[in-house]
Amino acid sequence: MPTSGAQIERLRRKAEAYLRESAHTPPIDQSATETAQLVHELRVHHVALRLQCEELRQTHLELEESRNRYVELYESIPVGYFSLNPRGAICDVNPAGAAMLHQPMNRLIGRRFHLFMPVAQRRRFIEFCKQVCFERKRLSCEVDLGDASDDQPRALMNVLLEGSPAQGQKDIMRLAVIDITRRKEAEQQLKVHEDELRTSRQKLQDLNAQLLNIQDEERRAIARELHDNCCQQLAMMMFSVNSIERCCDEPLTHKVRMLNEQIKRTLESVRHIAYGLHPAMWDTMGVEEAMRSYLKDFIEVTELPVDFHAIDVPRRVPEVISTCLFRTLQEVLHNVVKYAQASRVEVRLIKNENTLSLYVTDHGRGFHVKTMKQSPRGLGLVSLKERAQLLNGTLNVTSQIGVGTMVHVALPLTSGNDHPM
């Protein structure tokens, strides 16, 4: 492109040639005033031309600076830029693009871009180019790049292609190539870690299920031992004390009677502990009757009104489901007595289609559910939630300050929940 000085010199030569041609024209008679006016207008035009030339020169400098910035950006940016003709051949490329293909820039001109891809991906790239040219808008796709003609095979590079039609050039397509190899490697590593985490979580859940199963088995064994051994021994002790009471003198009768009452209370305590560990009614009467019996004892001990309703509850329920529901009821009622200051409690055991649900609602103080995990009451509920999840169920807690709290656990009655946890 000519410089601004050369343009001015060219205009000056044209002006001198014009004046020489005008010199052969017969002069026109003009007065001094008209001549002065004409000279003034010429000077004005001269100044205007000088200003226009200065503006043109400044504009030219700005365009040159802008072009230099574009060239610098085009050549230094770590994104490959290619211009492809209708045959898919490279007609322009920046240094970053040449580096991606491991070729000098001058050796790339005229070569078809898709030849640097694996054979299996070339057809997809050709269809991508056709779509860009047909829809006349920016589109993107992911492919692998490598130099197929290199004697030393190179690892393929994962790239993101962004194709768009060139403005003002109907048959030219601009192609921006972004190296996403590291991103792909990071995504692959992330996927591996996610798989490992998923496996670890599954192992942890299996271990938790085994621990819960062992815990329930131990509770069952302890309850059986208390019932079959301790309770029987205490009953025999009461029988012996009664025999002594009938045979002893009057001064000892009162003390023997007090001893008999202590043994009776101890027997009731042991039976209550055994029942809390594993109600024997589970095996004979089912979870509904076990809950009724437990709530009856709970009301007698705490004097807290409890309204219990059961709807369509089957008599035979898988033991793991009965255990989960009963432990939930125990834990929630324990929290009600300890924290809620409730005036009454409502318990609902409902079968709906293939799901057995337990609702425990207290009319007490309520609390902020978001802080549940940090509170002592939350630890037990979190454990119960994990137990429910092991059975493909859910446990949800809703609470409102000054109104009360509702705990809802729902467990599917499927064959998958027939086995021990």
Image (cartoon, helix red, strand yellow):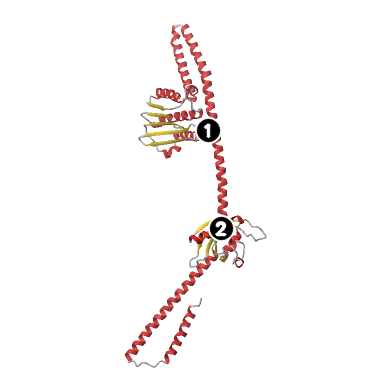
Residue 83 in the image: state x and y as whole percent.
Answer: 54, 65
Element class at badge 2: helix
How many residues crowd mark 1 within 10 Å: few (<14), some (14–19), many (20+)? Answer: few
Looking at the image, tell me whether mark 1 or mark 2 is earlier in sequence order: 2
Residue 314 makes an appearance in the image: yes
Q: Which of marks 1 and 2 is in front?
A: 2
Q: What's the residue at 56%, 37% (across, down)? A: 203
Element class at badge 1: helix
Q: Which amino acid does label 2 sit on?
A: Phe
Q: List the single residue furthest toward the right.
A: 151
Residue 99 in the image: state x and y as whole percent.
Answer: 59, 62
Residue 147: quadrant of the picture: bottom right
Residue 340: quadrant of the picture: top left
Foreground residue, 223 or 38?
38
Foreground residue, 154 or 109?
109
Q: What's the residue at 47%, 10% (across, down)? A: 242
Q: Which amino acid does label 1 sit on?
A: Gly
Q: Which residue matches tag 1? A: 416
Asked if labels 2 and 1 touch by Cβ distance under 8 angstroms, the answer is no
Label disc, if present, on residue 125 of the rendered structure:
2
Residue 137 makes an appearance in the image: no
Count of picture labels: 2
Residue 315 in the image: state x and y as whole percent.
Answer: 46, 25
How many residues crowd mark 2 within 10 Å: few (<14), some (14–19), many (20+)? Answer: some
Could you tell me how far apart the alpha carbons at marks 1 and 2 are, in whole angstroms? 48 Å
Label disc, if present, on residue 195 of the rendered structure:
none
Residue 368 in the image: state x and y as whole percent.
Answer: 40, 38
Residue 258: quadrant of the picture: top left
Query: In this picture, is 6 found above or below 146?
Result: below
